[in-house]
Image: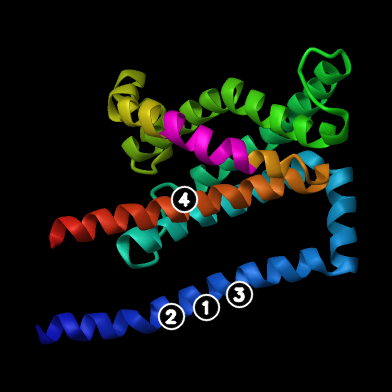
Amino acid sequence: MKHTIRSAQEKSPRLLFGDTLTILFFVILAILLLNDKTRTIYVNLNSSHPYILGFLKVGILATFGEILSLRISKGKYSTPVGVIYRFIVWGFLGVVFVTVFELFFSGTKALLEKQLLPYTNNARTFFQAFYTSVLMNLIFAPTFMAFHRITDAYIDLGNGNLKKIFTTKFDDVLNAIDWRFFVKFVLGKTIPFFWIPAHTVTFLLPSNYRVLVAALLSVFLGILLSFKKRSVKLAEVK
C-alpha cells in the first residue's frame, strides 16, 4: 500500500509537468496564430510550401494527439508504439489532405456553378462548405480512415520494429482490425455526427487554415473518445 502511494506521489509531478507543457503548447500555438506578424509568416510559408507545411502540421499535431489520448486513457504520458513511423504516416496524410481539400472544394464550386447542386444565392458560401464536407467525408474519408487503420495495425503488429513491420502478413493485419467497430462507429457515427459538421466549419475558413484546423479537430476527437473509453473502464471497475 505504501509503495503504491509513493509511486503515485512520484508520478504526480511528472503528470503535472506534462500537462503544463501540453497547455503551454496550445497557448503558444494560439498566440502565434493571433499575432499579426507570426500569422503572416505562417500564411506566407503555407502558400509557398503547402506540402511541407501540410506534412509538419498534421504529423506533429496528430501524433501529439495520440500521446494525449494515451495520457487520458492510461493516466500517464507515454509514446505510442512506433511513434516515428506514426508521425511519418500522419505527415504523408497531411500532404494528401492538402490536395484532397482543394480537390473537393474546387470540385464543389464547379458543381454549384453548373447548378448541379441545390443552393440559395444568399447562402452560397455555406452551401459550398457544407457540400464539400459531405462529399469529402462520404467519398474520401472512408478510404483514408481504412488506410490509417491498416498502417496502425502494421506498426502495432510489428511492435514498432521496421523489419517486423515489413514482414507482417497483410492477412494478419486485416484480422487484427475490428472492422465491425470501424463500420458501425467510425464510419457510422463520427462521420455524420462529428466530421461533416466540423469540416463544414473548416471549409468556411480561408484555405491556409483548413488543414491546420482539420488536424486540431482530430486531436479534439481523440481526446473526447479517450475520455469516453476511460469512463467506460472506470464503470467496469466499479
Reading the chain from its start, which is encountered first: label 4 or label 1?
1
Looking at the rendering, which quadrant does residue 137 occupy? top right
Q: On screen, 7 above or below 182? A: below
Question: Local crowd at mark 2 within 10 Å, few (<14), some, or many (≥20)?
Answer: few
User: Are dots 1 and 2 in contact, CB under 8 Å?
Assistant: yes
Q: Identify the residue at image location x=78%, y=30%.
A: 128
Q: Quadrant of the N terminus?
A: bottom left
Question: Local crowd at mark 1 within 10 Å, few (<14), some, or many (≥20)?
Answer: few
In the rendered image, which residue does mark 1 sit on? 20
Question: Does residue 97 appear to the left or right of 225 in the view shown?
Answer: right
Q: Kindly report the distance in space between the C-alpha atoms of the residues bearing marks 4 and 2.
A: 21 Å
Could you say which is closer to the camera, residue 229 or residue 153?
A: 229
Give the residue type at disc 1: Thr
Question: Does residue 213 appear to the left or right of 196 in the view shown?
Answer: right
Give the residue type at disc 3: Leu
Looking at the rendering, which quadrant does residue 181 occupy? top left
Give the residue type at disc 2: Leu
Give the residue type at disc 4: Gly
The range drawn in magenta is: 186-198
Could you say which is closer to the camera, residue 195 or residue 114?
A: 114
Could you say which is closer to the camera, residue 190 or residue 70?
A: 190
In the rendered image, which residue does mark 2 sit on? 16
Q: Identify the residue at image location x=63%, y=27%.
A: 134
In the rendered image, which residue does mark 3 sit on? 24
